[in-house]
Image (cartoon, rainbow, N blue to C red):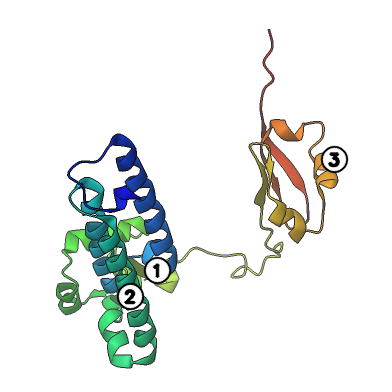
């Protein structure tokens, strides 16, 4: 465990061991932080991501720094982060600080310049975000807001929304979710258990293909299995 401590120099193996420990430790820390900090970077998430990155990066590149101090600091920051999230759920003022409400940028086809300035967004960027939502004209927008996570929520006014089967009172089929049950010859046993079937049933459903040759097979809500890709056997 000498690679944990400050050294005048580290061997190649010690650098590798330090990298492995640092990587695994960051995985555990990220798991403790939760999916919120991974899926979107809000104010508090951005601060913690920058801080943790700097803390771990230094001992992984400088042999004169030990890993122990960085790991203790990281654990302390993770605890502080979790505590801050918990307190923000209990104290409205903290919630307002850490997770400010969305800023309304467009309402009824009219731009709110004051909130646009608060969000520090140029009009060109706003139009770029609108194009991502397939909106080319600001007058067609009923409501658009800049979310704390750094995304634009856009709701098109009713006359410009696409017609749906319910609008035309047309009959529709129930939603049928399709999921991959075999990928590269490996079975997703969780799905298999969920639909109350076994391996023998699956092998019958994918015939004449062999299970180990199946690149992708899917199953839908009606338990219909469809093979999409199969490995080609090498022939001389």
Of labels 3 and 1, earlier in sequence is 1
Instruction: Tell me the SS state at disc 1.
Output: helix
* Above or below 175: residue 6: above
Residue drawn at x 23%, y 52% as measured from the top left: 59
Label 2 sits on residue: 81
In the image, residue 217 lies at what x, y percent? 69, 42
Q: Quadrant of residue 16?
A: top left
**View extreme (top): residue:** 236
Instruction: Choose mark 2 or mark 3, whichever is in front.
Output: 2
Q: Quadrant of residue 76?
A: bottom left
Q: Nearer the viewer, residue 149 or 163?
A: 149
Any part of residue 228 in sight: yes
Label 3 sits on residue: 204
What quarter of the picture does the C terminus occupy?
A: top right
Q: Residues within 10 Å of mark 1 (few under 14, many from 20)?
A: some
Q: Residues within 10 Å of mark 2 (few under 14, many from 20)?
A: some
């Amino acid at each position: 465990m000498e690679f944990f401590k400050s050294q005048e120099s580290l061997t190649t193996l010690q650098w590798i061991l330090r990298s492995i420990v640092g990587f695994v430790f960051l995985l555990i820390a990220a798991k403790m932080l939760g999916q919120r900090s991974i899926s979107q970077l809000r104010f508090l998430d951005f601060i913690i991501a920058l801080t943790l990155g700097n803390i771990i990066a230094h001992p992984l590149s400088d042999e004169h720094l030990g890993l122990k101090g960085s790991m203790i600091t990281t654990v302390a920051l993770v605890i502080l982060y979790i505590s801050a999230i918990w307190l923000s759920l209990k104290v409205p003022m903290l919630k307002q600080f850490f997770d400010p409400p969305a800023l309304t940028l467009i309402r009824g086809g009219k731009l709110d310049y004051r909130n646009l300035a608060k969000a520090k967004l140029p009009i060109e960027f706003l139009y770029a975000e609108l194009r991502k939502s397939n909106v080319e004209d600001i007058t067609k927008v009923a409501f658009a807001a800049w979310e704390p996570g750094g995304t634009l929520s856009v709701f098109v006014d009713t006359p410009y929304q696409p017609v749906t089967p319910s609008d035309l009172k047309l009959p529709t089929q129930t939603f049928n979710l399709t999921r991959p049950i075999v990928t590269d010859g490996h079975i997703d046993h969780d799905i298999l258990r969920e639909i109350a079937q076994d391996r023998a049933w699956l092998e019958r459903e994918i015939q004449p293909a062999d299970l180990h040759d199946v690149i992708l097979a899917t199953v839908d809500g009606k338990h219909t299995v469809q093979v999409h890709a199969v490995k080609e056997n090498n022939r001389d």
